[in-house]
Image (cartoon, coloured by chain):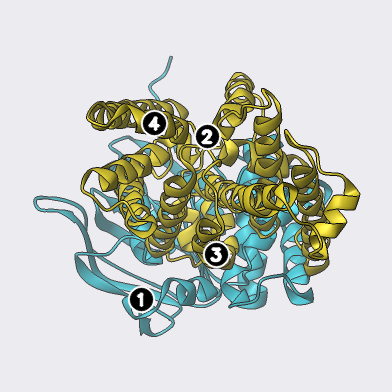
Chain colours: A cyan, B yellow
Amino acid sequence: MALSGQGLGFGYGDSQVIREVDLSLAPGELLGIIGPNGSGKSTLLGLLCGLLPPNAGSVELLGRDLGSYTRVEVARRLGLVPQNAELAPGFTVRQTVLTGRFALQGGRMFENDGDLAAAQRALMDTGLTGLTQRRTGELSGGERQRLALARALAAEPQVLLLDEPTSALDLKHQLGIMTLLENTCARDGLAVCLVSHDLNLAGMFCHRLLLISHGQTLAQGTPEEVLTPELLAQAYGVQVCVDHEPSRGRPRVTLSAPPP
Amino acid sequence: MRATPSRLTAVCLGLSLLMLLALLVGLWLGTVSIGPGQFWDWLTGNLKGSSAIILGQLRLPRLLLAALVGACLGLCGAVFQAILRNPLAEPFILGVSGGAACGAVVSVLVGLSGLWGQAALAFGGALGTVGLVLAIARRRGSMETSTLILTGVMINAFFTALIMFVISTTTDQKLHAILFWLYGDLAAANLTKVALLLPVTLGGAGVIFFFARHLNLLTAGSVAAASMGVAVERVKMIMFLVVSLLVGVTVSLSGLIGFVGLMVPHLVRMTLGHDHRLLLPASALFGASFLMAADTVARMIISPSALPVGVVTAFLGAPFFVLLMAKRGSRWW
């Protein structure tokens, strides 16, 4: 397993944000975490990358307890794209992507050819090659999101966690980012775990979905198994229709509203 | 500008030349002008009399101290701006210099008036204030401009009151010296002070430069920095100690010289960009030249009398600060 969590819990006293969550992520797999607002999706991601310490259970990264790694050792294996792309002001796009190489540079003060090549690949993959000299403050929301992804990809991680990677993107870039993640999974065996609000996008690209509600696992399995009207009604408290989208035949969720 | 070893070398060479120029001009200019002939005699050890004393015992130590203090303040400004993620952060504005001054004043009060005792208590004062500032910034991971300014104003108000209280109990003869010191003055420079500050500056600058790439990531934000492999709390703690040491020792030797840490890193960023591998060394070297030049102006402007150099830096720095504030909203990092 690339990444796995057993009996994960997080919270303070009676107010547990996460309770008894188990999950596993294999190399080359794309796992989507879905659930309503405030269900603990982002907290779960925080536990999985080691930035939040679980108060129950444990996380294993590549077969070793996450707590036994130093921060830089984690960063060499696992990348994180946080929800609000945190970018250094004043840095250009290329400089920002190069900072992503930090964990691999050790004590080296300056970038070498390997760093430059990895950054260039990440810029190409995310479609940012035309913007390399642009400063982070001049970017649109979607460009910032892609830049944060490029910075994480530049470190060539084995596991990548993303919090709402497509939330600020238009249709073209949503498709672009999801295909990129799918291809990188298939090509390099990258294990991806992403939190998403977009059930249809998640259902279309993820191999498996984890539905959480009130910090607990409601369902885990293939999109067909998880995206059912019953489970979604239970999680979100609304009636939905589920049919199949035409391109891949994956489940498609639409709200069912009363007639006008 | 992308940081490469050759660019770093070029920047350091260029700014070292500027520093040398500032030193030569500072030695030459003054109430008593020293011509190139006399200067050459002094360099070769053939100059006797009052000119030799003016050069060797007055101007040279004063310029060297200015250079070291300027380097420290430039560096500290850059580090504060990175860690608090606010371009207006600076030791003087944050009240850290005030805390150090307070420590130095207390050292006089309790009878620890030697250079080391004063520096030690000033370091303590700076440490306490930086701790307070970081505790306030901690909750959000960065510092809003309004919080930053208000914190600084309140810390400074408190320390000013405390310093005034101490001053009220001292004799009139000391008053002039204390007052000048509070405005940042280099008139009392001597080679002993230079010898105390030199190793502190070199050591501090070395440690800070070692963390240049960490600071690059910290300006992006704590979560991003941690996810990319920075031990955020540990790096912040080390920076916190080093910066407190530099500010503490600097203030105990030269008083409250404001705004250098604001202006110097900003001017460097405008030309060299934001990468700390270039920004830090350049801020140190340019800060040195800047304060040597400012002190030369302070000595010349109301000659034969001299201003505290802090008056000159405040005349330049306060409008600079207001300008930066006014530009807020557009992209001023």
Do labels 4 and 2 touch, CB within 8 Å?
A: no
Q: Are marks 4 and 3 on the same chain?
A: yes
Residue B173 x, y percent position in the rendering: 36, 30
Name the kind of residue labelled 2 in the image: Gly
Q: To which chain does the residue with label 1 belong?
A: A
In percent of the image, x 67 and y 36: which residue is there? B294
Residue A221 x, y percent position in the rendering: 39, 65
In percent of the image, x 64 and y 55: which residue is there? B280
Q: To which chain does the residue with label 4 belong?
A: B
Q: Hey, which quadrant is residue B3 in on the image? A: bottom right
Q: Are marks 4 and 1 on the same chain?
A: no
Residue extending farthest to the bottom is A63
Residue identifier under label 2? B258
Q: Are marks 1 and 2 on the same chain?
A: no
Residue B223 vertical position relative to residue A76 in the rendered view, above or below: above
Give the SS element for disc 4: helix
Disc 2 vs disc 3: which is toward the camera? 2
Residue identifier under label 3? B211
Residue A66: give its label.
1
